[in-house]
Amino acid sequence: IERLFNRDATFYEKFKEIIEKIGFDKMKLKAPVDEAADVVMTDKGHLNPNPIPISKEDVIKCLNDINDGNLWMSYLIFV
C-alpha cells in the first residue's frame, strides 16, 4: 500500500524491518473503521503532501490492514 502513495520505498523497507525486529503486538482499532477513516480524512497536514490524492476508501483499506496485523503496510497515512 505504501508504494501506492510514495514511490520511494527506502523508508518503507527500513520501517518494516524495525517493526519486525521490535515485534510490536498487533493493533486493533477501537472505533469502527468507517468512523476512524472520517477522522483520518480531516488530517490534511498529513494527507495533502502525498504525491497522489488519498481517498476515504484508501484510508479504510489501510485501517483494515492495521486491524489485520499488517501495520507496516499502512504507515504512510499516519506518519
Image (tube, grey):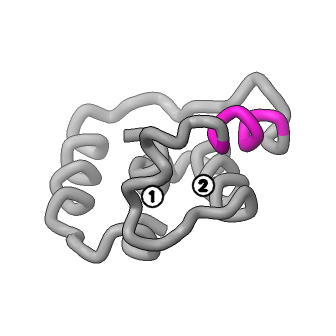
| Residue 52 on the magenta span | no
Residue 13 vertical position relative to residue 8 in the rendered view, above or below: above
- Measured as percent of width and height from the top left, residue 32 is found at 84, 34
Residue under the point 57% across and 31% down? 27
Taking depth in this image into account, of 72 and 22 the one nearest to the observer is: 72
Indicate which disc residue 73 carries. 1
Quadrant of the rendering where the C terminus is positioned:
top left
Asked if the residues shown at circle 2 and circle 1 are in contact, with their CB atoms under 8 angstroms apart, the answer is: yes
Which residue occupies the foreground of this view, 54 or 21?
A: 54
Q: Is residue 29 left or right of residue 17?
A: right
Quarter of the figure with residue 14: bottom left
> In the structure shown, which secondary structural element does the residue marked by tag 1 occupy?
helix
**Picture residue at 58% right of the left edge, 45% below the top:** 66
In the picture, measured across the screen, residue 41 lies left or right of residue 57, that is: left
| Residue named by callout 2 | 62
Residue 17 rendering spot, x and y as whole percentages: 21, 51
Q: Which numbered disc covers residue 9?
A: none
Is the residue marked by circle 2 packed among few (<14), some (14-19), or many (20+) residues within 10 Å? many
Q: Is residue 21 above or below residue 70?
A: above
Does the segment drawn in magenta span residue 36? yes
- The x and y percentages for residue 20 are 29, 45
Occupied quadrant, residue 57: bottom right
Residue at 72% across / 43% down in the picture?
37
Give the residue drawn at x 29%, y 76%.
Answer: 7
Q: Amino acid at mark 2?
A: Cys
Instruction: Specify the principal SS of the magenta part.
Output: helix
Occupied quadrant, residue 65: bottom right
Q: Amino acid at mark 1?
A: Met
Helix, strand, or loop for circle 2? Answer: helix
Magenta segment, which residues?
35-41
- The earlier-in-sequence mark between 2 and 1 is 2
Residue 29 at x, y = what percent? 69, 30
